[in-house]
Image (cartoon, rainbow, N blue to C red):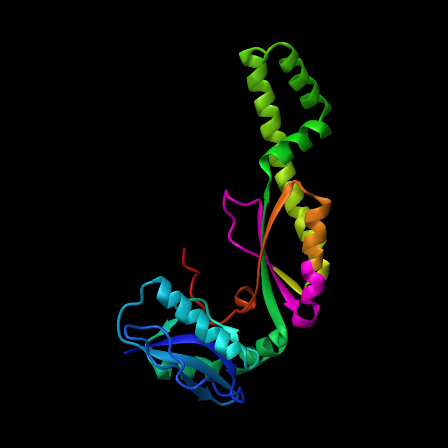
Amino acid sequence: MSTYVYGIVRASHPALPEGLEGIGEPPQPVRVLPQGEVAAIISDLSAELRPKRRHLLAHQRVVDAAGAGGVVLPMRFGNVSPDDDTVSSVLSDHTEEFLQQLDALDGRTEYNLKANHDEEAVLRLVTAENPEIKSLAEANREAGGGSHQDQLRLGEMIATAVQARETEDADLVRQALEPAAEAVSPGPQSSGWLTNLSFLVERSSADRFRTAVDTLGQKHPHLELRLSGPMPPYSFVSTPSDPEPED
C-alpha cells in the first residue's frame, strides 16, 4: 500500500472537510499525517496510478479544500511515496524548508498566462513596421502576385520578422506583468505559444494583476492572451519529493 501526497500544511492547519475523498478506485478517504510543525495531506493508494480525468479532478478537489482553510504547498499530480513512514521522514528532515515556503506563499495565489499572436494582425504589423517587406509586398501585388522567386523571398522575410517579433513580444509580456506580481516562473514552452508564464500574486492584488493583463491586451491587440487562475501556487513549490510534471 503506497501513500499519495496532495500537499503540505502547517500542523495547526484547520481540519479538512469531513468525508473528503481523494483518488483511487474506489476513492480513498483523505487524512492528515502530522510530523512536528508540519503535516502532509495524504490518502492510501493500492494500485498503479493512471492520469485519468477523475483522478486529476480528485487531486485538485483535495488541494482546493485544503487551500480554503489556509496556506498549502500543493504537490503536482502523481506524488506517490512508498508508505506513511517515508512521508514522515521527508517532513521531519525538511521541516524548516517547508515552513519557509508556507510563510512565503501565505496569502498568495498563482495565475498562468499563455500568449500567442493573432496571425493576421501580426502579419499586418510586421509588414507595416518593415519598409522592405511592405515594398516587396506591394510590388508583388502590382505584378499580379510576383515571380516565384519574389514570393519565396517575401515569405522568408515575413517568417524572419514574425520570429523576431515573437521573441520581442515574449519579453514584452513578462516586462508588462512582472511589476504586478511577486514572482514569475516560466512554464514549459511549446510551438503553440510564444510564451507561457506563471505569476505569484498576492490575493489582495489580484484585481491589479488582472487589470494589467487587460491593459496589455488592449495596448497590443495582435497578442492573444489566455489567463488561468487563481489556482494553487504549484509553480512556486519546491520539495524533495516533487515529481516531474506529466504531459
Q: Quadrant of the C terminus?
A: bottom left
Which of 223/48 is in front?
223
Res 167 → quadrant: top right
| Residue in the image at 53% along x and 13% along y | 148
- Residue at 55% in and 82% down: 69
Where is residue 18 shown, x and y percent of the image? 42, 86
Number of residue marks? 0
Tell me residue 188's x, y (percent): 51, 53
Above-or-below relation of 53 to 170: below
The percent coordinates of residue 45 (x first, y second) are 31, 75
Residue stretch rendered in magenta on the structure: 185-210
Residue 42 % position (x, y)? 40, 79
Q: Find out whether residue 201 is within the magenta segment.
A: yes
Q: Is residue 68 left or right of residue 176?
A: left
Q: Is residue 132 above or below residue 78?
A: above
Q: Nearer the viewer, residue 245 or 71?
A: 71
Image quadrant assignment for residue 134: top right
In front of the other: 221 or 201:
221
Side (left or right) of 224 relative to 132? left
* Residue 177 horizontal side relative to residue 227, left or right: right
Residue at 52% over, 69% down? 238
Which quadrant of the rendered structure holds the N terminus? Answer: bottom left
